[in-house]
């Protein structure tokens, strides 16, 4: 069964191509989003990892895409990974910077140190007893979650995967591993008969 769900991946900077490749595991129409006008054709959006300050700069100074993106993520489902989680947050620390406010969380940027402190761990989430590979690259730490936010996975005592309604954020990079659970759970939120979206 072919689904009509259209998923956009914000393609200004960062690991957008890896998300696009990961979405090939599902029967969805996936496309890169470069301009505000592109948002009209999608049902849900992935905001990738990368460098949140660079994305902010591009969104606010080049083409004034910020307001349109803010409206989109307040109305429609989104998934932010790493820098994407920083952009979707409602408060950002270290240092303070603008964010879209789609998720009631506070994040601290670069909370685990510099590039050299980037790391890969095995972790568990609340859905599955098997390990999921957690790739952290200059990851933020979620230091506060609002009452409407559900924690889906933790690492070292901090939330690393959270959900509020149809919006999700992960401080790790699911697009760099073969485990599809983050996409599955996000898509399931949007379209409960997820089996229709699974290609195999
Ligand atoms: N440290 C980056 C930032 O603050 C996030 C890193 C990443 O997305 N891998 O935006």
Image (cartoon, rainbow, N blue to C red):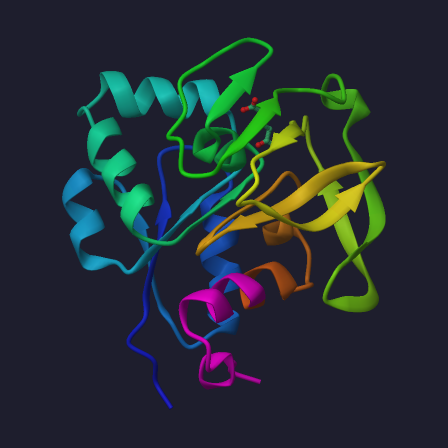
Above or below, comparing residue 103 to residue 108 in the picture: below
Q: Position of residue 165 (x, y in %)?
A: 46, 54
Q: Quadrant of residue 182?
A: bottom right
Q: Is residue 6 left or right of residue 177?
A: left
Residues 145 and 102: in front is 145
Q: Is residue 33 magenta?
A: no
Q: Quadrant of residue 190?
A: bottom left
Please name the residue shown 72% across and 22% down the image. 115
Q: State whether residue 135 is above or below residue 53.
A: below
Which part of the image, by quadrant, shows the N terminus? bottom left
Q: Residue drawn 53% across and 36% down?
A: 85
The spot of residue 101 in percent (x, y) is 40, 31
Is 189 a magenta residue? yes
Q: Is residue 14 left or right of residue 176?
A: left
The C terminus appears in which quarter of the rendering? bottom right
Q: Which residue extends farthest front? A: 147
What is the span of residues highlighted in magenta in the rendered image? 185-200
Q: Position of residue 55 (x, y in %)?
A: 39, 26
> Who is closer to the viewer here, 196 or 91?
91
Which one is in front, 100 or 13?
100
Query: In the image, what residue occupies the spot 73% across and 17% down?
Result: 114
Considering only vertical position in the picture, is 73 above or below 52?
A: below
């Amino acid at each position: 069964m072919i689904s009509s769900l259209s998923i956009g991946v914000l393609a200004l900077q960062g690991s957008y191509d890896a998300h696009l490749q990961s979405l090939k595991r599902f029967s969805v129409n996936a496309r890169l989003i470069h301009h505000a006008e592109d948002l009209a054709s999608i049902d849900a959006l992935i905001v990738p990892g990368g460098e949140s300050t660079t994305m902010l700069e591009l969104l606010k100074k080049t083409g004034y895409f910020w307001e349109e993106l803010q409206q989109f993520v307040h109305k429609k489902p989104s998934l932010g990974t790493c820098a994407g989680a920083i952009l979707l947050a409602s408060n950002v620390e270290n240092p303070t910077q603008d964010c879209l406010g789609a998720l009631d969380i506070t994040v601290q940027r670069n909370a685990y140190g510099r590039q050299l402190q980037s790391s890969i761990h095995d972790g568990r989430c609340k859905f599955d007893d098997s390990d999921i590979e957690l790739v952290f690259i200059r990851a933020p730490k979620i230091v506060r979650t609002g009452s409407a936010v559900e924690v889906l996975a933790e690492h070292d005592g901090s939330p690393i995967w959270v959900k509020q309604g149809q919006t999700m954020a992960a401080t790790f990079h699911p697009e760099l591993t073969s485990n599809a659970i983050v996409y599955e759970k996000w898509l399931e939120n949007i379209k409960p008969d997820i089996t229709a979206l699974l290609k195999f």
